[in-house]
Image (spheres, rainbow, N blue to C red):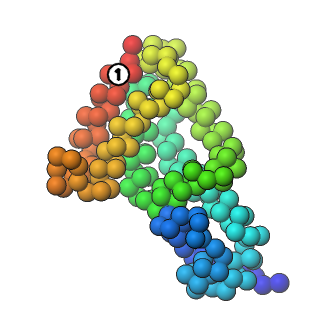
Amino acid sequence: MRTRDEQKELAIRQKAIEMIAKEGLDGFGVNKLAKAAGVSPATIYIYYKDREDLILSLGQQVSEHMLEVSLKDFDPAMPFDEGLRIQWINRAAYFMQYPMEVEFIEHLRYSHYHQKIAGAVTQKFKEAMGTFIKNAIGRKELIPLPFEVYWSLAFAPLYQLIKFHNQGFSMEKDHFSLTNEYMMQALQLVLKALKP
């Protein structure tokens, strides 16, 4: 049996994430990945059973990384303003530092893999967010809303600013770069909308 090589495994993971992020799942295959990663197809099977195992494993790893970054310095008991501010900063940092992971996850989100990956990873996130929202409503810092309405109001403005940043322009500006000032201005309006 061949031994595991951490460098080869890392190259396989990075190249697979990059390929799926850029080309989607349809054209993604083990032979194509092996060629791009500079390894033989047999080498990939040392680390993963098959294509599905590889995709699910990568989806799990990337989702856990996104969760880890999103919850950095966050405590569900903190005041609503502070907790949402930390989440915005963390999410913006993740989207800007790991654009390939973001694109990779987007492709999985609209595939049959999403449900298989989401269960275990999202439980910790649901618990943290559920407690955070419940605490904020209990302290009268947040109006009670259906989760989907809350999520849309709380995060869609941030994601739109990130989209403008990623494309490098907006409908009004030939060059747009997301600054802390823009982000905090949008956050203050979101907080105003969500408070009783």
Residue occupying image coordinates x 68% and y 66%:
54
Front residue of 147/92: it is 147
Q: Amino acid at mark 1?
A: Ala
- Among the 4 quarters of the image, the one containing residue 30: bottom right
Q: Is residue 36 visible?
A: yes
- Residue 13 position by quadrant: bottom right
- Residue 2 location (% of width, % of height): 78, 84
Q: Position of residue 132 (x, y in %)?
A: 53, 27
Name the residue located 39 percent from the left edge and 21 percent from the top edge.
194
Dot 1 surroundings within 10 Å: few (below 14), some, or many (20 or more)? few
Instruction: Give the structural element (helix, strand or loop) at label 1.
Output: helix
Asked whether, in this view, residue 132 is left or right of residue 120, the answer is left
Q: Residue 18: where, in percent of width, then height? A: 50, 69
Please name the residue that numbered disc 1 is placed on: 193
Specify whether 3 is left or right of 83.
right
Q: Residue at x 39, y 27 (%)?
A: 81
Q: Quadrant of the C terminus?
A: top left
- Farthest residue to the right: give it: 1
Q: Quadrant of the N terminus?
A: bottom right
Picture coordinates of residue 183 (x, y %)? 29, 40
Q: Nearer the viewer, residue 104 or 95?
A: 104
Q: Is residue 62 left or right of residue 180?
A: right
Give the number of marks: 1
